[in-house]
Image (cartoon, grey):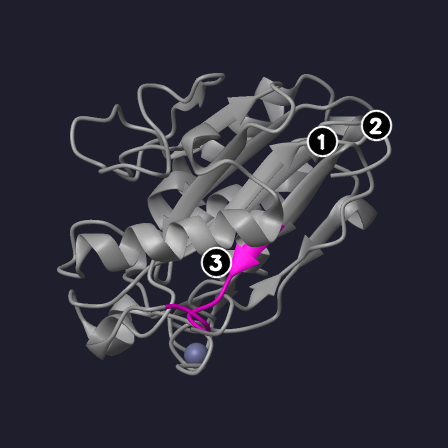
Amino acid sequence: MNGPVIVRPPVDGPAGAAVTTRAGGVSTGPFTACNLGWGQGDAADAVLANRRAVCAALGLDPARVSVGRQVHGTVVRATGPPPVPGGFGGALEGWPDGDGLTTAAPGAGLAVLGADCLPILLWRRDVPRVAAVHSGWRGLAFGIVENAVAALGDPSRTGAAIGPGVGPCCYEVGDDVRGRFTARFGPSPVRGRHLDLAGAARAALTQAGVPAEAVWLLETCTRCDGGRWFSYRRDGAATGRQAGIVWPAVSASGA
Ligand SMILES: [Zn+2]
């Protein structure tokens, strides 16, 4: 197989961050090729092979990468080491909810999975401490980004990367959701009947005190770009998951 194609957001601190794409990997059919999600119907051995390949490319031990059960909640759970209660190298069943994860353990990764929802990766720019967030509109509206920023302890020294999600071109939402976002973030994340999820995430980060220049945003749309991304809205329930992964550096010199 070709190695997984991975996007590396710039990180100005003792941490590493990565966003996987669907390119490079061993999954087939609707899960082609680098599916990292469990429970959508892909073969378990393929998912594990993809997860191992991604971790190898990033220099991470899959047994030290945490992933939670994602329920569109707002809790940010402290983890690792070891990952609580398991790792990226095993099955998802029986794991606690974890749309938000945080750790200060060097080399311990945090993974969030998505197929239209945003992976949002955060790190302290001065000390090895990171957080990862999986968020659709519910998480954003109910404060998971603010919770993750607070968990890191110093917004002025926090950086963030907003990964691939469904773009404002493809994300129509109801009146109630638009109303929530206008009330919380002002008019800019709402475009007609559509919602700019990434723009709202950026607003949530800066409102929580993260400097605007410390927020990196991947300009894309998971539904429009089927060559790079899995998309629930485009392909339905049987599709794969890309991941955002963040980890505190093992040494101060880099990830
Ligand atoms: Zn689109």
Q: Which residue is label 1 attached to?
A: 249
The amino acid on which the numbered mark 1 sits, given as a three-letter code, is Ala
Q: Which residue is label 3 attached to?
A: 197
Residue 87 percent coordinates (x, y): 36, 31
| 158 sits to left or right of 226 | right
**How far, Cα to Cα, is label 3 from label 1?**
29 Å
**How far, Cα to Cα, is label 2 from label 3?**
33 Å
Q: Quadrant of residue 67?
A: top left
* Magenta part, dominant SS: loop
Quarter that holds the N terminus:
bottom left
Residue 163 numbered tag: none
Quarter that holds the C terminus:
top right
The amino acid on which the numbered mark 2 sits, given as a three-letter code, is Ala
Mark 2 or 3: in front is 2
> Residue 224, can we see it?
yes
Residue 36 percent coordinates (x, y): 34, 55
Quadrant hosting ligand 1: bottom left
Mark closest to the chain's N terminus, 2 or 3 = 3
The magenta stretch is 18-25
Residue 252 numbered tag: 2
Residue 46 percent coordinates (x, y): 26, 59
> Residue 145, can we see it?
no
